[in-house]
Each structure stands twice: as structure tokens, then as C-alpha cells.
Amino acid sequence: MADEQRLVADVLAKDRKATADFVSRCSDWVYSFVRYRLTPRTEMVEDLMQETLLAAWQGLPNFRGDGSLRSWVLGIARHKVEEYYRRSIREAESPNDEDSALEPTVIPMIEQQLDTAMQQERVQATLVLLPETYGLALLWRYRDGKSAREMAELTGKTEKAIERLLARAREDFRRRWNDARS
Amino acid sequence: MPEADVDKVFRSLLSVPHETTDQAPASLKARLYSAFIRRQQESGPLASLDATVASAHGICVFEKLVQIAPVAEKVKSPFFCQVCHARVLAENFDNPPIFWPHCPYVEFKQS
């Protein structure tokens, strides 16, 4: 802790070596965190890391050292990732959404015996093919564990609209998954 | 398929076994560091190299030359790595051929 307090003081004093140490430590923490949440849509990892580190630096005067620097920085990273999900989904066009007869998605596709590693590979490959909004909506809902209601509150959309978005995303996922198999 | 089951299938599909503890690529650290220092400079000069040495941080051979140069302190404060080839190599390669002690870009590839 004392080591972290000193590091913070030196970064605030704009010591370039302390800054290098800060960037190196934070990058490793934030990289794993952000990558885990965005994989396979990793094109935004670098931007989100930069935004996180910058926000951390700007907020360093408020770092009191009650918890670890790692927890504090990861809290900022969590917020940045969530903001990215929220922005992307909020800005997405909502097609005429009365086609919600898509639900419930039927998924006759998951081979129970599929090798886990192979399945992961196929999931990533399918996610990459989806439109960005669909991919992010699925990741936010199923990897990050946000409920449709929470997603609706955070994006300013109705819960119904989010459910329709998720239904379309699942349907597109299922279609591409099956296309890849055939 | 009931919605709860659909959710269960997707949760299982999209979960990743565990969050890894991968290190960030050295080139990414290098780019972030350069961007960071540039931002720091926008709000005033960086700490002097004398202060850096006084804080028990090492400085590289090029910074040492600047530190001992008989010039005004403000001339010594810029981000000299901006013109160093070590920065360019480090920002573009994960294992660049740079080896000077106390160069942050060298340390990124070793961390």
C-alpha cells in the first residue's frame, strides 16, 4: 500500500519513470479485464485501455488508498466497458420492431458432445460475424450478466426493445452458427 | 424452447472458462505510455530528471546525457523519448531490439 501511495504521488508529480511503472501495472490489470469482456470483438481494447488509464490518471488525486490501486483502476475499467456497451447499443438503429415473432429462439444446434475448446472457437468465430450491436448485446447480457431491464435502464431504451434486440441477436447467431456447420 | 432455457444455453456458450491474467502486449504498453506522457505534458512540464533520480528511479544513457548537460532546467523537461528510435521500435514491435538499462520501452518488453 505504501508502495502504491508513493507511486501515485510520483505520477501526480509527472515523474516519467513512475508513470511508466503505473502504465505497465495498470495495463496488465486492465488488459485482461477488458479483453475478457470484449472477446472476440477486441478492436476496441486499446481505446478502452487508453480511456481507462487516462480517467485513472485524472482521478488519481481522489485515490485515497483505502483499497488497492488495482481494484480502483478495475472499477474505472468496468465503468468504461459498460459505457461502451451502452453507447453502442443506444446509438444502434432500432428496426421496425414489431417482428418479435422471433421469440423464442430455437437452438437445435448445440452438439452436447462438442469439444469445449472447439466450441469456444466456433462461438468466437460466430460472434465476430454478427453486426456489432448484436454481438455486444449478447456479450453484455450473457457474459457480463446484465438483465434486459438493467440494459434498458442503462441505454434509455424500453425493456421490450432490448428483448427484441436480444431475440434478433440470438436468431442471427443461431443462423450463422448453423450456416457455418452446413 | 422456453426462454429460460434459451438464456441458459447462451450463458453457457458465451461464458469464457475464466478471466485470464494475460499481460498486455509490450507494444500496447509502449503506445499507451507515449500517449500518456504527451497528455501529461499538455498540463505543464514533466518532473525534472534530477527529481526522477532523487526518487531512486534509474534513467537511461540518453537521459543521463541530458541531465548533466549545462543547460537551463526547462530545456531538460520535454519528453525526449519522442525523438528516440527505441520508442518507435517499441510501439511497433512486441520484442524490439532495444536493450538500454532504465529505458521504459525496454522495461515494457521485460515486464
Image: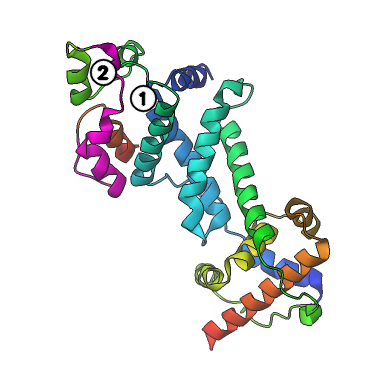
Residue B92 lies left or right of residue B38; in this view the side is left
Query: Is residue B79 within the magenta segment?
Result: yes
Residue A128 lies left or right of residue B105; in this view the side is right
Please tell me whether mark 2 or mark 1 is closer to you in this view. 2
Which of these two is toward me, A122 or B25? B25
Q: Amino acid at mark 2?
A: Val
> In the displayed structure, would residue A182 be above or below residue B58?
below
Q: Quadrant of residue A167?
A: bottom right
Mark 2 touches mark 1? (CB < 8 Å): no
Q: Which residue is mark 2?
A: B75
What is the C-alpha distance between the residues marked 2 and 1?
16 Å
Query: Is residue A105 within the magenta segment?
Result: no
Host chain of mark 1: A
Measuring from the top left, give residue B20's x and y in whole percent: 51, 49
For the point 53% across and 89% down, the residue is A182
> In the displayed structure, would residue A177 be above or below residue A149?
below
> In the displayed structure, would residue B52 be above or below residue A34?
above
Q: Quadrant of residue B56?
A: top left
Measuring from the top left, give residue A143's x and y in whole percent: 64, 58
Q: Look at the image and give the residue range highlighted in magenta.
A: B72-99
For the point 55% across and 25% down, the residue is A60
Host chain of mark 2: B
Q: Secondary structure at mark 2?
A: helix
Numbered badge on residue A16 = 1
Residue A72 lies left or right of residue B66; in this view the side is right
Numbered badge on residue A25 = none
Instruction: Determine crowd level at label 2: few under 14, some 14-19, many 20+ residues with C-alpha closer than 10 A.
Output: few
Measuring from the top left, give residue A40's x and y in whole percent: 51, 62
Instruction: Determine crowd level at label 1: few under 14, some 14-19, many 20+ residues with C-alpha closer than 10 A.
Output: many
Q: Amino acid at mark 1?
A: Arg
For the point 50% across and 40% down, the residue is A29
